Image: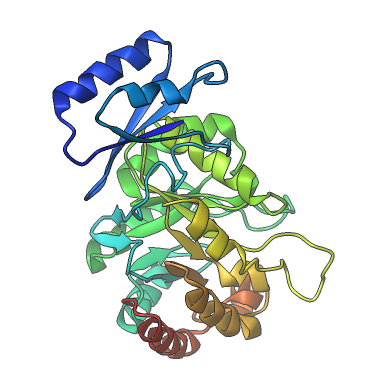
Amino acid sequence: MIIKFKNDVKEKELDKIRKYLINKGFELHESTGKSTKLIGVIGDTISFDPESLYAYDFVDTVLRVQEPFKQVNRKFKPEDTIVDVSGVKIGGKNIVIMGGPCAVESESQIDEITPIIQKAGAKILRGGAYKPRTSPYSFQGLGEEGLNILQKAKNKYNMPVVTEIMSVEDLPKFIEKVDLIQVGTRNMQNFALLKELGKINKPILLKRGLSSTIEEWLMSAEYILAGGNKNVILCERGIRTYETSTRNTLDISSIPVIKKLTHLPIIVDPSHAAGRWEYVEALSLAAIAAGADGLIIEVHQTPESALSDGQQSLKPERFTKLIKKCKKIAQAIDKNL
């Protein structure tokens, strides 16, 4: 249930209704916008009559929320959330490009690629230190050494980094060294991890599960917000369907649906959706046109010798050309890239 108050509501009036609802056993979450003041009421409201709240003359509207997600719901917070990733703002009118290799392979590799993607227009460096792979015999990443390499590049080029966390035990290292903590598709419903991420203030990039509905995805985001961390960015990376021509099927329709249902920003990963570098450009442009707040794209100097996902990685020159095209789309839809 969401209570919207009149614009001239006083703090002492809010205190009165807060005490009343808390005494009823409800948990309250408040949201303040430019012209709105809302309180989200969480708990068993089935036997509670929302009409009774109109007895308070400072209450404007009372809404029952049918969706199971509350805090991520746009009804609870009508304004877009803008997430600040170490100075890079994602959401609203901003479109942000993240780029880099699938996996951190060496310090020299990251030191070479970072200034290239930065010059092209990328604002955040991506690179996997810990790699969840389908096969146990595939390259699993450099682990903490990879985190250290990313941190060096971050400090040298003043560029925030995003990388995927695999285990709750690694969280202290990620808090210290990473600007944007990615939760991969396989961990989207790792609720123990999500609860811990809700206790910190670091921005979280939450990828959609490969077979998850939008509601399940938003419920995972709800876990993080319910813990107190409001800095969540959603990432559509394609879902598993019967189609085998691409690695996954990019659900472009999820972008406007997400924009309607939630205030959280959404970016798109065309690399994992396509599985082939030839399709990355078209999917990227389509995502921007559909309203995505950014892209996370795999870029590698020599994809043919990459230790992970070389087949879907763009060479630097293709990445540079793609960003130029993305800027034209962004301009056409009145956004900033």
| Residue 275 picture location, percent across and down | 68, 72
Q: To which quarter of the image does residue 327 belong? A: bottom left
Q: To which quarter of the image does residue 29 belong? A: top left
User: How is this picture coloured?
Assistant: rainbow
| Figure check: 309 above or below 328 | above
In this orientation, does residue 96 appear? yes
| Residue 111 picture location, percent across and down | 35, 71
In the rendered image, the residue lying farthest to the right is 242
Q: To which quarter of the image does residue 172 belong? A: top left
Which of the pair 286/30 is nearer the observer?
Answer: 30
Q: Which quadrant of the figure contains the C terminus?
A: bottom left
Q: Residue at x 36, y 16 (%)?
A: 21
In this orientation, does residue 300 appear? no
Q: Residue at x 58, y 37 (%)?
A: 66
| Figure check: 191 above or below 186 | above
| Residue 15 picture location, percent across and down | 21, 19
| Residue 126 picture location, percent across and down | 44, 63
Q: Residue at x 68, y 50 (%)?
A: 213
Q: Residue at x 69, y 54 (%)?
A: 210
Which of the pair 313/81 is nearer the observer?
Answer: 81
